[in-house]
Image (cartoon, rainbow, N blue to C red):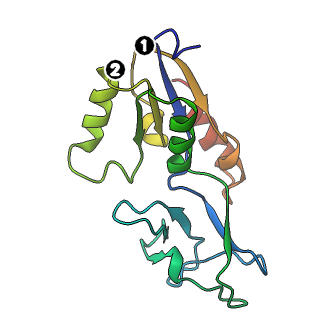
Amino acid sequence: KAISENKQVILFLNRRGFSRTHICKDCGEPRFCPSCSVGLTLHNNRYSSDKLLICHYCGSTETLSSIKCDNCGSTEFTSIGFGTQQLEEEVKKNFPGVGVLRMDQDTTMMKGSHEKILEAFRNHEASILIGTQMIAKGHDFPSVTLVGILDADMSLYFSDYRSGERTYELITIK
């Protein structure tokens, strides 16, 4: 309805990348970073068609086509969960012709890119803004009439006793 009324939409998903977990189809073992043992996140590769597994902790990368399961040696993997890249693809598929911008750490690495994305949205160059916590606070867009928080309870289950308070602080207006 917001799009049909020429209004704007913000979709908040506090998970960058394409898919948050990559697991072996044969044994169910998740793919972990060889350097720091953190779970790897699947990302689209902007330089080739091969997808990347990236550690969001240390930055280590592996190409999807080159990995084997450390547990059983299989090369068959599947992805679980979704991130801002996958959300962007789905939104573009379901709303063809509607301008979509994505703002996360992957799209704001270049100097000034953060401001360019916000300015483009402010100037109505796109109707939908998808982003991580960097879009959650401090913005005033009069044409935004719908804000969606996807997977809002995800951060409630972090291994931190303050996770409930942090989630509340992130998604409420102050």
Amino acid at dot 1: Ser
Q: Amino acid at mark 2?
A: His
Residue ID for mark 1: 143
Q: Nearer the viewer, residue 174 or 142?
A: 142
Q: Residues within 10 Å of mark 1 (few under 14, many from 20)?
A: some
- Judge from the rendering whether residue 137 lies leftward or rightward of residue 86; answer left or right: left
**Which residue occupies the foreground of this view, 160 or 84?**
84
Foreground pick, 92 / 82: 92
What secondary structure is found at the residue carrying circle 2? loop
Q: Residue at (20%, 49%) from the top-left corner?
A: 111
Which x, y percent locates residue 92?
50, 36
Residue 103 lies in what quarter of the image?
top left
- In the figure, 102 relative to 85: above or below? above
Measured along the vertical axis of the image, is residue 51 above or below residue 26?
Answer: above
Q: Residue at x 39, y 25 (%)?
A: 139
Mark 2–mark 1 contact, CB under 8 Å? yes
Instruction: Tell me the residue at 56%/70% (across/down).
Output: 40
Q: Specify whether 163 is left or right of 170.
A: right
- Estimate the x, y position of residue 48 in percent, counting from the top left: 37, 66
Label at residue 124 = 2
Local crowd size for mark 2, using a 10 Å CA cut-off: few (<14), some (14–19), many (≥20): some
Q: Residue at x 44, y 35 (%)?
A: 135
Residue 153: quarter of image: top right
3D distance between C-alphas at marks 2 and 1: 9 Å
Q: Position of residue 113 (x, y in %)?
A: 26, 43
Which residue sits furthest right? Answer: 27
Number of numbered tags placed on the structure image: 2
The numbered mark at residue 129 is none
Question: Residue 166 in the image: x percent, y percent?
Answer: 60, 43
Which is nearer the eye, 166 or 113? 113
